[in-house]
Image: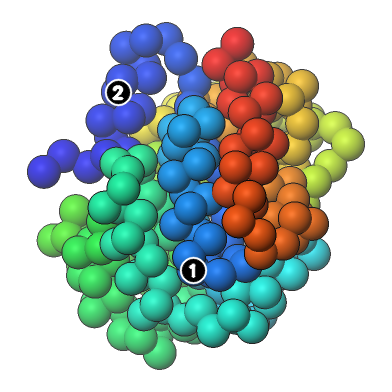
Amino acid sequence: MQNRIDTTFAKLRDQNRKGFMAYITGGDPTLKRTVEIAVALEDAGVNFLEIGIPFSDPLADGIANQLGAQRALAAGTNVRSLLQSVAAIRQRTQIPLVLYGYLNPLFQYGLSRFEQDAANAGVDGLLLLDFPPDEASLATETGVHRIRLVAPTTSESRIARIVSQASGFIYYVSREGVTGERSDVSQGINEQVARIRKYTDLPVAVGFGISTPDQARTVAQLADAVVVGSAIVRRIGEIGDTDTLAKQIGVFVRPLVSAVES
């Protein structure tokens, strides 16, 4: 079966449109709400959903995502229960799903077993922050894409090596440091995306620091997809565990989606 990431990017390309990718932390504030939020995000027009695997030491994450992970862990979320939640999401939507995480929890679970279980649950892509391309790749038989990261500081030769081991799309980290909302769009995105495209035909998604419709609109002119995470996770924390949470998150995200579509 063709990967949903591929089919969605192909559809967007045929329609001359850019994609919107939302990030949430799995289990924040509960796994039940995660399923509800996922459905609401698709209804709001989100094209791809990135779900963070909560971890106690998320080195690349800013305060909003750290707090989201803390809330999820406090609610009892672990890798096994999150995969069950992903399976529940997959029963209600065909939105492409990317799991984002760190190696430690997956080593504990078992890397090969994790990827197979993730594929069975309906995951389309896996983005591991601390899994360098120099290390042996995970097994490829499952059809789950290995999303690779490129940073502003990545050298040209390193870009070539990273993208050669990527599938699905390339995630360009648009600024140095951790995740989090910023008041402006990072400089040099156009040049860096062009560097990446010298070495791969894969779509390029740009994230880190994008939080407003104006910022999303600007980045959409430079990339194939725009990623917004911290602003959504912060809003989830502000609203809390209520029956209207998913609906409110859908309302919050819709202007961002509209900006990318425009």
Q: Write the residue at 68% across / 77% down.
A: 70
Q: Is residue 175 left or right of residue 32?
A: right
Q: Which residue is mark 2?
A: 10
Residue 189 in the image, given as x and y percentages of width and height:
67, 29
Q: Write the residue at 32% across / 12% down.
A: 14
Mark nearer the N terminus (2 vs 1): 2
Helix, strand, or loop for circle 2?
A: helix
Q: Against 29, is 15 above or below?
A: above
Look at the image and tell me whether residue 77 can be seen: yes
Total label count? 2
Number of the front mark, 2 or 1 = 1
Tag 2 near tag 1, CB within 8 Å: no
Q: In the picture, residue 82 is in which quadrant?
A: bottom left
Helix, strand, or loop for circle 1?
A: helix
The quadrant in which the C terminus is found is top right
Q: Is residue 218 left or right of residue 72?
A: right
Which of the two residues, 50 or 244, is positioned nearer the viewer here?
244
Look at the image and tell me whether residue 205 can be seen: no
Q: In the picture, residue 63 is in which quadrant?
A: bottom right
Disc 1 marks which amino acid? Leu
Q: Write the residue at 60% across / 42% down.
A: 247
